[in-house]
Amino acid sequence: MQYIPPLVFSSLGLLDPALVAVLSWAGGIEHLPSVFSWIGGMVVMGGVGLISYAEHKRSQT
Amino acid sequence: MTISVNPQIDCTDYPLRTIEFNTKVSPQFVDSEECPAKALAISSGGLTMTRGQHEPKSWISQKLAALNVFQRENDYRLVEAHEKDIEISDVEEAVTMKSVEMVSTDDCEANIENMISADEKESSEQNQSWRNFLLACFSMAVAILAGASVPPVFKYLARSGIRPCLAASWRCQCMALIIAPLALIESYSDKKYKVDWFAKKPDLPFPVIVHVLFSGLAWGGNLLMWIVGMQYTTAFIAAIMGSSYPIMLVISLKLTGSPVSGMELIGVGISVGGMLISCFQDVFENNHEKMGGPAIDARHQFMGYALCLGAAACEVAILFNRIKTKQYVPLMQYTFGTTIVVAIMATLASLLLEREGLIYYPLVTDGTTHVEVFCLAQNCIFGWFSKKWFVTILFFGIWIGVFCIAGFNYAVSSFLFLLLIFFLLTFVAFDRCNIFHL
């Protein structure tokens, strides 16, 4: 955390669901999610990213 | 020849700046009743210096020593090797400069030595900083990968017949064993890392240990709700729900009357909309079955979502508590304490709840009716010590427990990090060769 900006840190966390899907698929645990799930997931992560950005802005001021 | 600086001068209104010096002005130190930055500007003709944000406070004295040498020896080559521009923003630095008054220009030899060693130190610090940054990026990449591998591994364990709370117990037992020596090393590495567990701190309402226990309980709630909830939905949806704790954070801020910005509320609205899109499709098209799992009825799917959201709410409790305890309990000791609590919680939950007929697990079919304690089968509390599961759980414990935590926080030395990579790869190699399955 002391070397990487917090916003980058929290933004990269948004990749988590996509990585979970890919790892589950690669490990033969589950098939890849449908297009709808991806879209929904991206919208959720977009919202979470917006919240993280807003918090970052607030902590700066 | 000295620099005369009046520390009473308030430089706070003097904006941060890059001072361009006129190279034609002959370098001389002057007495100045004005801002010290200006005194330097006049005095250091022919030079441009920049004090970076992360430069030590001693930077000014080092540079002034260099200036003295510059003036005395007129050695342009030496001085040109230095930085550019100078920024002085507060009175504290002006005071630092005042101490430089004592630097004697007669002692040029010492100044040269100081300057050279300061330069070497500076250059080594810059290299170190780059190395740390790259290592931090690498650690974070590993940590993100380690964190993302948790849902598939738990799914794999469930499909292999391990009940979810029992799997959580195995993981935490293993993690605690791995983290215990790291916590010990941390504790004895420096006096400042010694924790006074029963001390009451001014900004904590309870003794430190109570806060760590509370964090453990919150983390236990988070892990158990999430891992059980994941039985009724896909790993992807569980990960989305689990990552939604910023939404819970905003909601909790709103409920406690703290100020919440419009952008945060819009973010919550967008996220909830995205969840509805994902869940709508998940429920009405029985996505779980399409994705290779068993068919799960809508009631259980909703229960799964509720549990995953509950897990995200627990994460907020962990976050708030960790912010408070962070300064009193270093990472590894904190992680060890909370892991022990979670291991106990998961063990009790498994023993009490994971009985046949009490909880419906669509994935787990191990043929046994309840969880036992002292045996090495896959329905036993210490079952991970069996030949069949030891390597897998150890891998899980090292990979998730250490790499994810240590990677995110970059709290271990690079040597330890490499050592852990070595152990990990060795165990994987052994596992591949079936050495533990003889």
Image (cartoon, coloured by chain):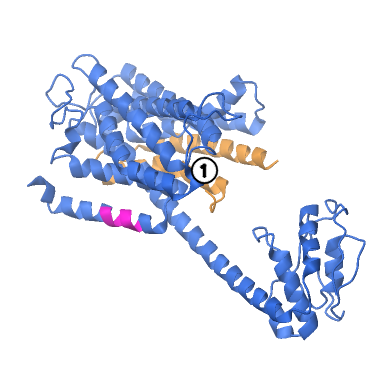
Q: Position of residue B249 (x, y in %)?
A: 54, 29
Q: Would you place residue B286 above or below residue B103 in this image?
A: above
Quadrant where the N terminus of chain B is found in the figure: bottom right
How packed mark 1 is, by other alpha carbons closer than 10 Å (few <14, some 14-19, many 20 or more), is some
* Observer able to see residue B8: yes
Asked whether, in this view, residue B142 is left or right of residue A12, the answer is: left
What is the residue that sits farthest to the right in this orientation? B33
- Give the chain ID for the orange colour: A
- Closer to the camera in the image, A13 or B296: A13
Asked whether, in this view, residue B123 is left or right of residue B401, the answer is: right
- Residue at numbered disc 1: A10
Q: Residue sitting at 31 percent across and 19 percent down?
A: B300
What is the residue that sits farthest to the left in this orientation? B438
Task: Give the magenta-colored segment's residue range.
Answer: B418-423
Q: Is residue B243 magenta?
A: no
Q: Residue sitting at 14 percent across and 38 percent down?
A: B386
Q: Residue sitting at 41 percent across and 58 percent down?
A: B414
The secondary structure that most of the magenta stretch takes on is helix
Asked whether, in this view, residue B310 is left or right of residue B125, the answer is: left
What is the residue that sits farthest to the top in this orientation? B357
Inspect the image, locate mark 1, and give the three-letter code of the amino acid beneath it.
Ser
Q: Quadrant of residue B261?
A: top right
- Closer to the camera in the image, B169 or B374: B374
- Closer to the camera in the image, A59 or B275: A59
Number of numbered callouts drawn? 1
* Observer able to see residue B360: no
Q: Would you place residue B221 above or below residue B417 in this image?
A: above
Palette colour of chain B: blue
